[in-house]
Structures are given as structure tokens and as C-alpha cells.
Image: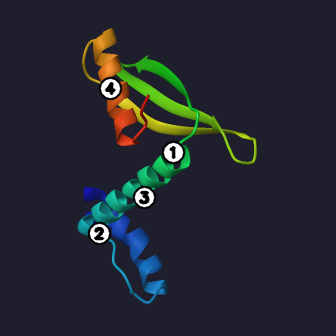
């Protein structure tokens, strides 16, 4: 988040802020606050969207340049009878890809969204 304090960033953003009459500012504190608030809203929206639905998980992994990522998507049929696919998480894997470790990571994500068996 230190980019918001960078002089080059300020040269770009200050004219935009001035055009809005300087009614708000962009700094490290409010960017962090807004990112956290928005992330919480997205999680809560997804919790409500998947609540009481029959779900299918789509899980995939990718490795590149010594980084391993686990992607977890959820699929379901909407009230309008269309297929909906939502990404629940993209997780960097930091341990050996054992069954127990992958299970733990998947369950952490499912718990975050209140998805139970």
C-alpha cells in the first residue's frame, strides 16, 4: 500500500481528486480500510448467495516459478435456472501438497463462507 504515498502516484491521482473538489483523500489508511470493508461485503454477499443451495466445488491447482496456487470455485444453479460460478479463493500453498494439507485449506475456505456438508 506504500504506492499511495509515491510521488508518481500522487502526480496521477491529485488532479483527479481536485476535479472532485478534494472531498476525499487517498492515503494508506483509508485504502486499507476500504479494501477490508469491500472484501467483507463480497464475502457476505457470497455467503448469502450460496446459502441453502446444492453446490458443486471446482478445485484446481497451478504451479509456476516455485509458487503454487490452489483455486476454489463454487458452482450452482441460480433462481433463474442459469449456471453460476463464483471464485471463493485463490490460495498460495506454502507446504507440501499432502491430502491433509489440501483438505485443511479447502475446509478453511468453506468455513469462511459458512458452507457445511
Mark number, residue 30: 2
Mark toward the viewer: 1 or 2? 1
Q: Residue at x 53, y 42 (%)?
A: 52
Is residue 110 shown above or below 20?
A: above
Circle 4 sits on which residue?
105
List the single residue furthest toward the top. Answer: 98
Is residue 24 shown above or below 5?
A: below
Q: How far apart, in angstroms, are the residues tagged by discs 4 and 3?
A: 22 Å
Q: Classify the position of the N terminus by image quarter.
A: bottom left
Q: Residue 43, percent across and down?
A: 42, 50
Q: Residue at x 35, y 64 (%)?
A: 34
Circle 1 sits on which residue?
51
Mark toward the viewer: 1 or 4? 1
Q: On the rendered structure, is 31 left or right of 56? A: left
Circle 3 sits on which residue?
41
Q: Residue at x 39, y 34 (%)?
A: 110
Q: How far apart, in angstroms, are the residues tagged by discs 1 and 3?
A: 15 Å
Tags 1 and 4 in contact by the CB under 8 Å rule? no
User: Which secondary structure lies at badge 2?
Assistant: helix
**Count of numbered circles in the view:** 4
User: Which secondary structure lies at badge 1?
Assistant: loop
User: Which secondary structure lies at badge 3?
Assistant: helix
Graded by Cα atoms within 10 Å as few (under 14), some (14 to 19) or many (20 or more), the crowding at tag 1 reads: few
Amino acid at each position: 500500500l506504500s504506492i499511495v504515498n509515491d510521488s508518481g502516484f500522487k502526480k496521477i491521482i491529485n488532479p483527479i481528486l481536485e476535479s472532485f473538489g478534494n472531498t476525499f483523500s487517498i492515503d494508506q489508511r483509508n485504502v486499507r480500510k476500504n479494501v477490508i470493508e469491500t472484501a467483507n461485503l463480497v464475502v457476505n454477499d457470497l455467503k448469502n448467495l450460496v446459502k441453502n443451495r446444492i453446490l458443486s466445488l471446482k478445485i484446481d491447482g497451478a504451479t509456476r516459478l516455485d509458487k503454487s496456487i490452489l483455486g476454489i470455485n463454487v458452482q450452482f444453479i441460480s433462481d433463474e435456472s442459469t449456471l453460476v460460478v463464483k471464485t471463493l479463493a485463490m490460495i498460495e500453498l506454502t507446504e507440501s501438497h499432502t491430502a491433509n494439507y489440501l483438505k485443511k485449506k479447502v475446509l478453511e475456505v468453506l468455513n469462511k463462507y459458512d458452507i457445511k456438508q
